[in-house]
Amino acid sequence: MNLPNRLTMARIFLIPIFLTVVSLRVPYGDYIAAAVFILAASTDGLDGYIARKHHQITRLGKLMDPLADKLLISAALISLVEMHRLPGWVAMIIIGREFAVTGLRSIMAAEGTVIAASILGKLKTVTQIVAIAALFLQEFPFDASRITLGNLAMGLAVVFTLWSGLDYFNRGWTVLKKGGI
């Protein structure tokens, strides 16, 4: 297994560690959880960079990398909802978008078409990671009367999540229409 795939697998293996730290509710647990989350999230950009730079892109990596991303982000969002730091509807928008885009990708793959990642998708990922980390690092639960860095970052993450999803569906629909679907 090459280094990029090992990094992807490390991200997956860090998820149960992250969830364990979150669930234990130990002193400084939120900070430890944030550190584990940031470590896991940092492997996302790194594995892709190494794979492209050293021509180590594999089918396993193409399958596991997006799965690892979705598992990590979903686990963190659900944890934040459980901790009352994030409204459930925000988590549902983000997770729902991932299911919808994955479904579209499956349809397009069956048609032999792939749409390249866009800068909006990358901004979505970065804002989600920053927002999640900030919400784990804040000491108070989500409260509409308090504007915190985590709340602002999550608002931005939702905007980029929706915008990138709409962009992906727009580009996908254009391609599929040309193919007669």
Image (cartoon, grey):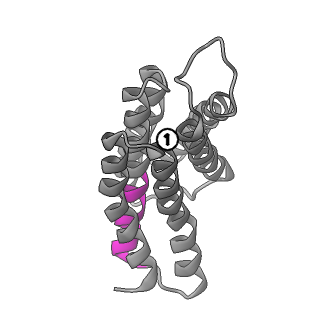
Magenta stretch bounds: 58-69
What residue is pinned by disc 1?
A: 177
* Residue at the far front in the pictured view: 27
Give how far across and how far down residue 98 sits, in percent: 43, 41
Is 60 left or right of 150, judged from the image as shown? left
Residue shown at the point (51%, 67%) measured from the top left: 43
The residue lying toward the viewer, choosing from 179 and 129, is: 129
Q: Quadrant of the C terminus?
A: top left
Residue 117: say if magenta: no
Q: Say what amino acid the circle numbered 1 marks.
A: Lys
- Mark 1 falls on what kind of element? helix
Residue 111 visible: no
Q: Quadrant of residue 112?
A: bottom left
Whether residue 61 is in magenta: the answer is: yes
In this rendering, is residue 169 above or below 88? below
Q: Foreground residue, 180 or 46? A: 46
| Image location of residue 162, percent across then percent down | 57, 32
Q: Is residue 21 visible?
A: yes
In the image, residue 87 sits, relative to residue 108, either above or below, namely: above
Please provide percent x and percent y for residue 119. 68, 53
**In the current view of this chain or complex, which residue is farthest to the top?**
145
Q: Viewer-proximal residue, 115 or 10?
A: 10
Residue depicted at x 66% and y 35%: 153
Q: Is residue 139 above or below residue 6?
A: above
Magenta: main secondary structure equals: helix
